[in-house]
Structure formats: structure tokens, C-alpha cells
Image (cartoon, grey):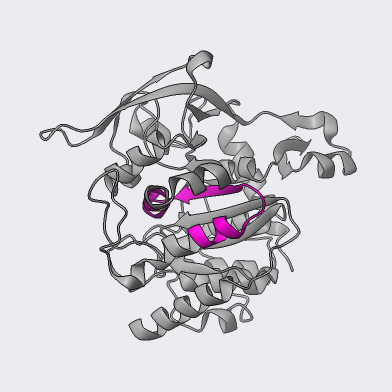
Amino acid sequence: MKLTSIYFLLLTVFVLSCFAPYGATQVPIIYSSDLYHPHGDPDDHYDLATLFAQEEFDIRGIVIDVRNSTIDGVGWQPIEQMMHITGRRVPYAIGLKNKLKSRTDKAFGQPAVFQSGIDLTLSLLRKSKEKVVLFSAGSGRDFAAAFNREPELMKNKVKAVYLNAGNGPGGIQWESNTDRGKHEYLRLFESGLPIYWCPCWTPEPWAKQISGTRSHKTYATLFYLTDQNVVYRDSPLAVQNYFVYCLTRSKDDPITFLKTGPHELPRGKRHLWCIAPLIHAAGRAVYERKPGDFVALSEENAGRKGLAGKKVKAFEFVPCRVVSQYPARRTKHIKQTVTFDSKKTNVHIFHTADTRYYEILTSCLRNLLDEIEK
């Protein structure tokens, strides 16, 4: 699709969003992700499927967090596919092209085509009668700039900000989302909004994290699929094709492709980060149906299925106080001091609470994908 066609498509979607009715579900959410096709990392496609799989989410809008300072390759295809599979219609828009110049930058100087992410966010917040969850699976740039433009609106209408970035307790923040936007990262921490910090990594040795053998508790959302085929091989055909389309970098029409196949399902290892925070944002908890079989359900649905007494605390958000230090001229990375002082809490930080975290999240994801339907 040509640049002008993508621009027209996204502009049309944004305009239509002004008249889009809200759903009847209970957790209004605006979702931001550096979603591309072909992908840079297909973890974003797993996150998007998890977002759409949970009926509690009233998905008000999606902001595509521009990763490469260009509109080329922005991931409208997976969004259109998920909307087709689930029958939901969700407005989406392109985010800012460039990093913020300062923590107070309102980004008015960036090109018009990249302003629609902020415009959509602020428009949706103004119209909302309820407080809205903001979920950032990227740089957080558009949410930070939106706060700079209308801080009182954000304070009045934002229920929580899930910020998937950083390294957790340990001082130095060198993770890719923080490197893509130090000003935006710090702006959100300093905003006074309710921050649910979801560090992508942790100070423990990197090799131990990616080995898939972590057996202790830690402050990082990362979990590891030894074979990503495991989580979608029993899903509905359209869901399987959604992942095949992504993982094979297909150039076919995205909606038509959903009806083809069956195809050979791609295999391979995969790191994922945002599944547990998305489960938490939906208001779900984890339950063990039988040994090794875990599901993420609302309390109401768990009771209906006879699982009320089988809740498992796989993860939690712990209150803490985070003090940030902006990098000096000769210092590349942000420094953050984390103390667990309940009297001076300004952030809730993600924490794995069960040594079976990898196993539990893999099972929950598989079961979520199996249930996606209209």
C-alpha cells in the first residue's frame, strides 16, 4: 500500500472514531504499541491478540508508536485482522515521528500526519465519562506529549498508565523503549499519573533471563516461549493465519489471508513482555484448572466455572517510590532509585510472585488465544 493510501486510511479511521460508539465492557483502554508489518519483533502481534482476546476491554483506540521515524510499514494489517476476527471496530492512528526535545515538549512542530495519535488520545479522553487506562508497549511518546498539552485532562480522565519499559530496580535504564525516548519516559514518571511500571528486564544476568530457566522471583515482565507454535496451534484457523501472516511477513491481502490454509505453522523461540500486564489491566487473575493448565479469568467467570478457590498469584504490582535522575551530558542512561516505602509510594512496580511464572504465562496465553472469536 502506498504512503498516501496509508495516510488516507488512518485519517479516515480517526475521523470515524469521533462517532464510534463505545462498547459495553468495563475497562476503557487506549493502547499504544510500536506495531509494524513486516515486524521488527512479533511480540507486538501477540500483545495485540491478547488485548482483543479479553472481553473486559473496551478498546477505545490504538496509537501506532512510530519506531523508525517513518510511516512506511506501520502495522495497520494486524489491527484490521484482529478487528475482522473478533467483530470489534476500533479507531487507530499514527503517533509522533520524532523523540521529544525535552520533558515539556508538546510536539506541535512535528508533521501533521504524525499528530493523529495525540489527537485521538485527547479526543477519546474528552468524550469519556469514565476514567481510561493508558497502556504503552513502546516509547510512551504520544501519551507523554498528550500530558504536556492537556495535563489536567489527563489527571482527571486517566485511571492508570501501564508503562512497559526499563530495567526495574538496579539503577541504570538502558532498555530499548527508554533509549527511544528518555524525555517521554521521565515525563510519565514525573506526571503524577498512576503509573504501573512494567520493567522489561531486571538487573540479574541477561543470559539467565533469556534462558527460560529462571526459577526465582524478579521485577521483570519477560517470559520465554521455547516454541511459539505451542501457544497458537490449537487456536481457531483465522487466529493461526493471523500469526502465519505476521511470522512469514506475508504481502498478501491481510483479510483474505485469514480465510486461507491451513498453513504450516511457524515454529521458533520467542520473548514476550506485555501479556501479564494486559491480564492485570483487564482485571483478570490467574486460576489453575488442573496441574499445569492455567487460565486468566475475571472473578465472576472463575466463580461460574468453579475455580474460585484455585487462584494462583503468578504476579503482582508492588507499591514503591521511584526517584529518577536524568542523564548528565556524558552519561547515556537514566538512573532510577527504587525504594519500597509504602508511605511515599508514587509507582506500582511489576513483580513475579510464583517461580512457575514462565509456565503459567505460556498456559494463560495459549488459553486466551484458543478462545478468540466474534
Q: Is residue 303 left or right of 159 when viewed as pictured?
A: right
What segment carries the magenta color? 122-145
Q: Is residue 165 left or right of residue 157?
A: left
Q: Position of residue 107 (x, y in %)?
A: 30, 57
Quadrant housing residue 306: top right
Q: Is residue 353 above or below residue 256?
A: above
Residue ID at (39%, 59%): 65
294, 31: nearer the viewer: 31
Residue that appears at 59% across and 46% down: 278
Residue drawn 40% across and 25% down?
A: 322
The residue at the point 69 percent across, 41 percent down is 283
Residue 199 in percent (x, y) is at 43, 35
Indicate the position of residue 126 as horizontal and vertical percent values.
56, 57
* Quarter of the image with the C terminus in it: bottom right
Q: Residue furthest front?
A: 152
Asked if the magenta segment contains residue 267, the reply would be no
Residue 123 lies in the magenta-colored region = yes
| The one of 254 and 139 positioned closer to us in this rendering | 139
Considering only vertical position in the picture, is 203 above or below 367?
Answer: above
